[in-house]
Image (cartoon, grey):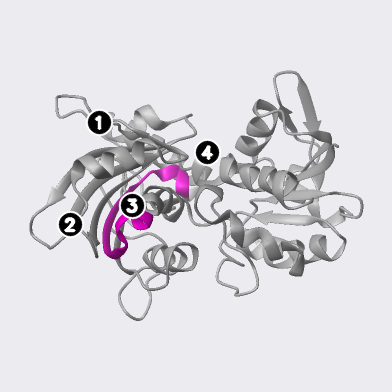
Amino acid sequence: MSYKVAVVGATGNVGREILKILAERKFPVSEVVALASAKSRGKDVSFGDSEILKTQVLDDYDFTGTDIALFSPGASVSKIHAPRAAAQGCVVIDNTSYFRMEKDIPLVVPEVNAHALKDFRKRNIIANPNCSTMQMVVALKPLHDAATIKRVVVSTYQSVSGAGKEGMDELYSQTKDLFVKDSREPSKFTKRIAFNVIPHIDVFMEDGNTKEEWKMIEETKKILDPKIKISATCVRVPVFVGHSESINIEFERPLSANEARNILEEAPGVVVIDRRENGGYHTPAEATGEDAVFISRIREDDSVKHGLNIWCVSDNLRKGAALNAVQIAEELITNYGL
């Protein structure tokens, strides 16, 4: 069986990555439709090595007869068009934040909680988690199963591609300007991002957390376990692609570094690169273009009872968004009767 698939936000970073992954994984498509805003009407986007799609306008598109729509256009657009597509019989897999915390919409990482898809027809909308949440829960799930996680303290080092093309352009232009002793005011970020780090992603909330930090906390609870206590600090760093996380974990039961390493080496979606030597770990540069969540620096934390530290990196455009959406679609086809 083959499926008519629409990619919404097809001209953006994630949309282009979705098209690439659909082709790479030989997803069973009968037709692929590229959708975006009116300003992108007729723009060429690639599907695979040889096929060029002409972008159509989302506002004008009738989703009747379209089986699956992979959305990454921004929350305000998904708010309007995802329910419209769902009402016309199309299954929506949405990369934006808009639907994630709605109780009757599954928030899914296939390696972690594919079972949440069982009621997907209730709304015909499935949410993709935040990119930072996604890589963290892939790492935490097998450890939680083994020793039950009580508390997580995570600090993120998030690339500028998480802020879209504008974020990547700003890092590039600021870096170039500094080398010629020029400067310009930041527009996408609140401070200069070139040769700097910014402890601020998304808007501030009343409790002092940013919305990005709130997302990591609440999404992890919804996906993995509502009883886990989580503290997050999210930082933007001058890296083009790839998010990194330093994760401190406190368990209910003992779990040694060796035991954790063995468990993670067998876990789906995880690759362990953990040699205690120069270069014996993964960085965002090595993770770019890869499907896996990479784990390094596995070590025991003696400052708490049953504590562990890990370093986690992943391609935020790929596994953190596009790949996960395609994996959800594959799971629906294989196990949930789509």
Report, in whole angstroms, how far the alpha carbon at label 2 lies from the one at label 1: 20 Å
The type of residue carrying mark 4 is: Arg
User: Which marked residue is nearer to the observer: mark 3 or mark 1?
Assistant: 3
Secondary structure beneath dot 4 equals helix
Residue 307 marker? 2
In this rendering, the count of numbered labels is 4
Label 4: how many Cα within 10 Å (few below 14, some 14–19, many 20+): many
Task: Pick the residue in front: 265 or 180.
Answer: 265
Residue 256 visible in the current orientation: yes
Q: Nearer the viewer, mark 4 or mark 1?
A: 1
Between marks 3 and 1, how big is the CA–CA gap? 19 Å
Name the residue: 60% across, 75% down. 103
Q: Is residue 12 magenta?
A: no
Frontmost of labels 4 and 3 is: 3
Reading the image, the residue beneath label 1 is: 281
The N terminus sits in image quarter: top right
Mark 2 vs mark 1: in front: 2
- Residue sitting at 15 percent across and 29 percent down? 276
66 relative to 256 in the view: left or right = right
Distance of label 2 from label 3 (alpha carbons): 12 Å
Q: Which dot marks residue 318?
A: 4
Mark 4 → mark 1, Cα distance in angstroms: 20 Å
Task: Give the amino acid type for the residue marked by disc 2 in the picture.
Answer: Gly
- Judge by depth and name the residue closer to the eye, 37 or 63: 63
Residue matched to label 3: 143
Q: Earlier in the sequence, mark 2 or mark 4?
A: 2
Please report the bounds of the magenta region as a residue range: 143-162
